[in-house]
Amino acid sequence: MAKQRIAWDQYFILQAILIASRSTCERLSVGAVLVRNKRVIACGYNGSVSGDAHCTDVGCYLVDGHCQRTIHAEMNAVLQCAKFGESTDDAELYVTDFPCLQCTKMLLQAGIKKIKYLREYHNSEYAESLLKKEKIDVEKIKVSQQEVDNLPFSDFLSID
């Protein structure tokens, strides 16, 4: 039987999950992938500003229940585009968790047209209303255990 190719949505959301494994946040690991024309243009995970201490090393710097040290995954992906001169206009975002209000506003300003996410996370009603008002395509993506089991990791692992 021929092997099934993974669907595009699962392909990119699984990349977001892998990217989340680089997170230095102790409270929630988040990964984001910006895509245009089925091509990854940037990735980001939540963590500290480059050169600053990581929460995993020194703990979170909490003020009013929010870590001041952490930059969100979505923002890191958009900032990567800014740093390297890649337009985010009309791009799609694949992200492990529904974006917070601040990231939602930033994504709208950056011209993101689609947001595909894996998990709900303290969804802001205002963020949801902004996305609806701006006609942003928002979709919750599912990944089945079978899709994960069909990944060819064993084909690439060396057995010594």
Image (cartoon, rainbow, N blue to C red):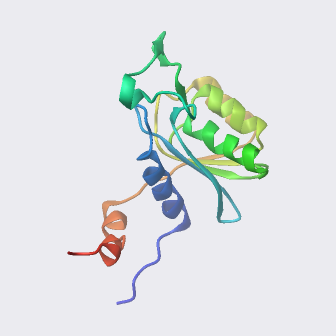
Residue 57 location (% of width, % of height): 37, 29
Which residue is nearer to you in this view: 42 or 146? 42
Q: Residue at x 56, y 25 (%)?
A: 124
Residue 133 location (% of width, % of height): 74, 34
Q: Is residue 146 left or right of residue 47?
A: left
Look at the image and tell me in which quarter the C terminus lies. Answer: bottom left
Residue 121 location (% of width, % of height): 46, 32
Q: Residue furthest left?
A: 160
Compared to residue 148, the image places residue 129 above or below, namely above
Is residue 80 visible in this depiction of the protein?
yes
Is residue 26 visible in this depiction of the protein?
no
Q: Residue at x 73, y 44 (%)?
A: 83
Instruction: Report how many numbered discs are placed on residues in the image.
Output: 0
Look at the image and tell me in which quarter the N terminus lies. Answer: bottom left
Compared to residue 37, the image places residue 138 above or below, namely above
Q: Residue at x 67, y 45 (%)?
A: 80
Q: Residue furthest top?
A: 64
Q: Residue at x 41, y 57 (%)?
A: 143
Which residue is nearer to you in this view: 40 or 85? 85
Q: Residue furthest bottom?
A: 1
Q: Is residue 141 left or right of residue 134?
A: left
Place residue 55 in its image quadrant: top left
Residue 8 location (% of width, % of height): 55, 66
